[in-house]
């Protein structure tokens, strides 16, 4: 197959490149490119960011959140994970499976969009059709931090009911244990590049192509509107012990905005909390926006001894 070279580790750029190639580069035969992302969580097009991802953990550890243009569940990427993209009229993940087998890995496709080795998942992939073309892209875990992978997708007690697509958790494994002859992912990627290209040359890419991809990154893929505002409706429950007592926030969020909000618990108050809740309806579910909305409100009237920072931290986290 012909191929493109992509050395970017920016998840927003890489998601934009996938869409750009699907929509703008038509080829008679499928072509591919291999790429990596810095630590990031990539959610599917129809997923709710708030119900699928441990957002406080991402913020604490500097992990990027991005949304892709294909369906499926949330995945964790780091620099020990290699991704592949295949674009064409009838692309298939089989070339990647065959390439892994040539390296000695007993890989096989499953009924769901996954590649398994000895009953454990090493790769998940998703697809999208546009016009007369289709894109397939997927992960390939070499030595991914599995503890972080588990933490970023762990949202215990926060998800009640979310419209859209929920992630499916499987037993996962790293390919490193199946590739003892390689000392690094760089070596594995180079070997896969050679096998998949089979002597073919690079694909012609428009002179202004990368400039257009960067524009898509800046105007779409890195924006709050796409990452959070595209989220379907979800119900969340957040609970914490505050100075006023135990407070539960029952939240309905749609397109990244608070649609419904109610407080429950054994807390002490002077005025009904629904008055305060009404000030937050229609606001973005993010700390800065909610603090601004409460700037002129004496929160302790509704939750005795509690400041706005404490309440907003409960709602957002």
Image: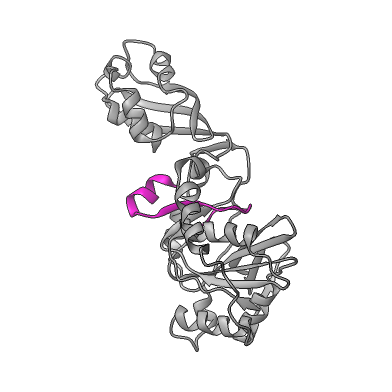
- Where residue 154 appears, as percent x and y from the top left, is 48, 50
Taking the image as drawn, is residue 153 in sight?
no
Q: Which residue is drawn at 50% across and 47% down?
A: 220
Identify the image quadrant of the N terminus: bottom right
Which residue of the protein is positioned furthest toward the top in this rendering? 271
Which residue of the protein is positioned furthest toward the left in this rendering? 305
Q: Is residue 23 above or below residue 254?
A: below
Q: In this view, does 56 lie above or below 208?
A: above
- Where residue 303 appears, as percent x and y from the top left, is 31, 19
Query: Which of the 4 image quadrants contains residue 134?
Result: bottom right
Left/right placement of residue 256 relative to residue 244 reads right
Q: Which residue is drawn at 47% across and 84% down?
A: 187
Q: Residue at x 44, y 81 (%)?
A: 184
Viewer-proximal residue among 306 and 49:
49
Q: Which residue is drawn at 49% across and 63% down?
A: 210
Left/right placement of residue 108 relative to residue 307 reads right
Viewer-proximal residue among 124 and 120:
124
Left/right placement of residue 16 relative to residue 284 reads right
Report the span colored magenta.
53-75
- Where residue 139 appears, as percent x and y from the top left, is 56, 66
């Amino acid at each position: 197959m012909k191929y493109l070279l992509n050395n970017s580790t920016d998840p927003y750029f890489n998601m934009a490149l996938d869409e750009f190639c699907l929509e703008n580069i038509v080829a008679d035969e499928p072509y591919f490119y291999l790429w990596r992302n810095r630590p990031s969580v990539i959610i599917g097009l129809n997923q709710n960011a708030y119900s699928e991802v441990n957002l406080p953990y991402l913020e604490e550890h500097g992990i990027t959140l991005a949304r892709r243009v294909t369906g499926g569940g949330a995945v964790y990427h780091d620099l020990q994970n290699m991704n592949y993209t295949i674009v064409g009229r009838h692309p298939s993940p089989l070339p990647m499976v065959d390439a892994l087998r040539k390296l000695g890995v007993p890989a096989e496709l499953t009924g769901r969009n996954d590649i398994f080795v000895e009953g454990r998942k090493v790769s998940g992939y998703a697809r999208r059709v546009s016009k007369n073309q289709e894109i397939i892209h997927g992960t390939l875990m070499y030595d991914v931090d599995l503890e972080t992978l588990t933490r970023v997708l762990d949202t215990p007690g926060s998800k009640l009911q979310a419209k859209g697509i929920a992630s499916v958790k499987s037993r996962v494994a790293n390919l490193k244990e199946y590739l003892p002859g390689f000392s690094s992912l760089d070596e594995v990627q180079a070997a896969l590049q050679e096998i998949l290209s089979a002597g073919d040359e690079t694909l012609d890419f428009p002179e202004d192509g990368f400039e257009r991809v960067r524009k898509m990154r800046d105007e779409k893929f890195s924006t709050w509107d796409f990452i959070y505002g595209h989220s379907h409706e979800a119900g969340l429950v957040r609970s914490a012990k505050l100075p006023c007592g135990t407070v539960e926030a029952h939240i309905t969020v749609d397109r990244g905005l608070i649609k419904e909000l109610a407080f429950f618990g054994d807390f002490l108050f002077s005025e009904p909390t629904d008055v305060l809740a009404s000030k937050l309806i229609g606001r973005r579910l993010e700390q800065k926006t909610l603090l601004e909305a409460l700037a002129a409100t004496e929160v302790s009237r509704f939750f005795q001894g509690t400041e706005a920072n404490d309440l907003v931290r409960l709602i957002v986290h």
